Amino acid sequence: ARMGLPALALLLTVELLHTQASLSARSFQLDYEHNCFRKDGAPFRYISGSIHYARVPRPAWRDRLLKMYMSGLSAVQVYVPWNYHEMLPGVYDFTGNRDVEAFLDLTAELGLLVILRPGPYICAEWEMGGLPAWLLWKPDIILRSSDPAYLAAVDSWLHILLPKIKPRLYQNGGNIISVQVENEYGSYYACDYGYLRHLLGSFRALLGSEVLLFTTDSTQAGELRCGTLQGLYATVDFGPGFNVTEAFGAQRRVEPKGPLVNSEYYTGWLDYWGEAHASTSAACVAQGLEDMLQLGASVNMQVVSWQRDHCLPLYMFHGGTNFAYWSGADYKDQYKPVTTSYDYDAPLSEAGDPTEKLFAIRTVISKFQPLPVGPMPPATPKYAYGWVALQKYADLLDVLDVLCPSGPIQSRFPLTFEALKQAHGFVLYHTELPWDVPDPATLSAPPHSICDRGYVMLQKEYQGTMERDRQTTLHVTGRAGDTLDMLLENMGRISFGANTSDFKGLLGNLSLNSRPLSTWLIYPLAIDTAVQQGWPHTALPKSSSGGSVGPAFYTGTFETPGIAWDTFVKFPGWSKGLLWINGFNLGRYWTHRGPQQTLFVPGSVLHVGHPNNITVLELEGAPPTPLLLFLDRPLYNRTLSRST
């Protein structure tokens, strides 16, 4: 017994030394001499795919990651959206669907490496590119720059996030092999090298000197000039159809040596409301992939002698869904909001189903490296629950006491969402006509001041919609003292393509025949809070007008036949609005504009054994007989999706 303790101490010491030796042997580095990555000293190339945990319900994480692993991917790319975790300053949420540490641990369990992209800006067609809306509470803040107010917020966030990441770095025994700093910064107008240097210093201080840090930009020379910095390895992004030699030549002009990396090889593209459903052929994507993987067998002396060890992340491999209000927008000559579905025509569909494109990519990968042993997991089961009847509960104007329990804010002129500290959703602006309007008068807003859609009611009667970069006038008649209400919808802050902060709400005053209106009551609406607490299903029945035009709530229930499988909801005859099931916000529908015609409903939000509560906020006009149709497949512009 007396000999046991020294022996045990010796054993523990040996084990500790062995562990330290094992960790010291773990490394992921750049080899500039041989133009490759080195993992544990050996040349290494990865083929990775992007997945956004914030767009996938937590119960589905394992299914999606396993399918990515079985496709032959060696790594996954993961964005961390700052605003998903810090919705109010200093208030953090890493629970449930937001538990990024659990997601990263699951990737490690399944044998996948991780390329982490923690921003602070991520784009990703995500609300405000991942930056929190509360940054705009300071109206003159300059985002993505050396502005002290912005840097202070960034530093506070990084001091919360990066310590969670450090133990999971590859050299520390984890599976994160590299970390991106910012994202496509060269496309932003600021071109602030001081900002990039500040981020580099923060990442190094919080993650250590050994982690591989990199940047990603397009292949345009100007963007690579402003988006790259010494000490950050520069990579590029491009999709099928690009000249591969020219594209990697752009990377070589800023990184003459080192591995070739396309950080975003686009397997598809996103959808905008009002445009055709985007799609990219499986053959085109597979051929582009094969062309890049074959570069090790060819030499293009016009640009550079290509080496075998280049890396290819596929963006997206699985897109998922912009639940609730998380969809962003692009600005390309006009405001272009992104659909709720982020299917992306990706190899794994929005519902996580393998597609023809996945199997084409898997075949190409098999030519260059062995595939995991075993079959590809099948598509998740779907169920068509059929027709569900709804009934009108109340017009929105009749339930303001529930949706804004603190009451309205009085202001001479309209206030923005940011001035009201309202991040998402809706704000109602209420005033009265100051004079009689017997003949049609023009209700108008200054250019670019409707952000983003305003639903107008006069004496509680719906008059029409005013919209950013589209219709900004309506003709109305009425008497002095008649109520005038405008419900303002935030369709998602710009995530890419504009150089100004995207404030929401009424940014300027409404005018009637060019005479400004004043004296407003402003209601910031907390609709999700009410619905999550069971309203309106737990509330007393509301007497409501029988009309089906204008913003109103509709309710209904349905039961599942002993199963809770994924499904898709179609909105026949409906116009535009939002859907909640059991308090979960499934996002926006907009059947009149499309292309998306259905909303994806994960089985994990459904109940078995008791009713599922449906709440719909229709904004423009419901059908005379309000019905929903639950299908077992999605629709885009009434065309079936291409999922297997």
Image (cartoon, rainbow, N blue to C red):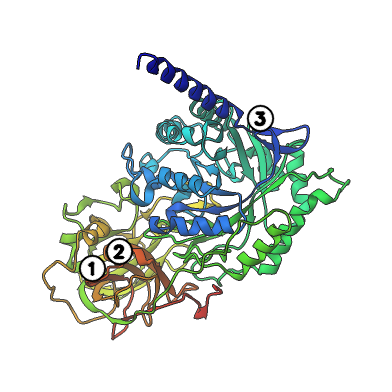
- Report x, y in % for residue 428: 27, 60
Per the image, the residue denoted by label 1 is 396
- Left or right: residue 597 versus residue 232 is left
Type of amino acid under label 3 = Gln
The answer to which of 354 and 190 lies nearer the viewer is 354
User: SS of the residue at dot 2?
Assistant: strand
Q: Quadrant of residue 92?
A: top left
Could you tell which of marks 2 and 3 lies nearer the N-terminus? 3
Kind of residue sitting beneath label 2: Leu
Quadrant location of residue 617?
bottom left
Of label 1 and label 2, which has the lower sequence position?
Answer: 1
What residue sits 53% from the left and 56% below the top? 331
Mark seen at residue 487: 2
Name above or below for residue 1 compared with residue 171.
above
Which residue lies at the image location 76% right of the left edge and 57% below the top edge?
Answer: 291
Residue 31, above or below 427 = above
Between circles 2 and 3, the one closer to the viewer is 3
Alpha carbons under labels 2 and 3: distance apart: 49 Å
Q: Quadrant of the C terminus?
A: bottom right
Percent x, y for residue 454? Answer: 35, 65
Q: Nearer the viewer, mark 1 or mark 2?
A: 1
Task: Confirm whether residue 260 shows in the render.
Answer: yes
Question: In the image, what residue occupies the spot 47% across and 38% down?
Answer: 142
Distance of label 1 from label 2 (alpha carbons) = 9 Å
Mark 3 Cα within 10 Å, few/some/many (few <14, many 20+)?
A: few
Indicate the amino acid at tag 1. Answer: Leu
Kindly indicate the quadrant of the structure image that contains residue 513: bottom left
| 166 on left or right of 427 | right
Residue tagged 3? 230
Of the numbered discs 3 and 1, the one sitting upstream in the chain is 3
**CB-based contact (under 8 Å), mark 1 and mark 2:** yes
Mark 2 Cα-neighbour bin, 10 Å: few <14, some 14–19, many ≥20? many
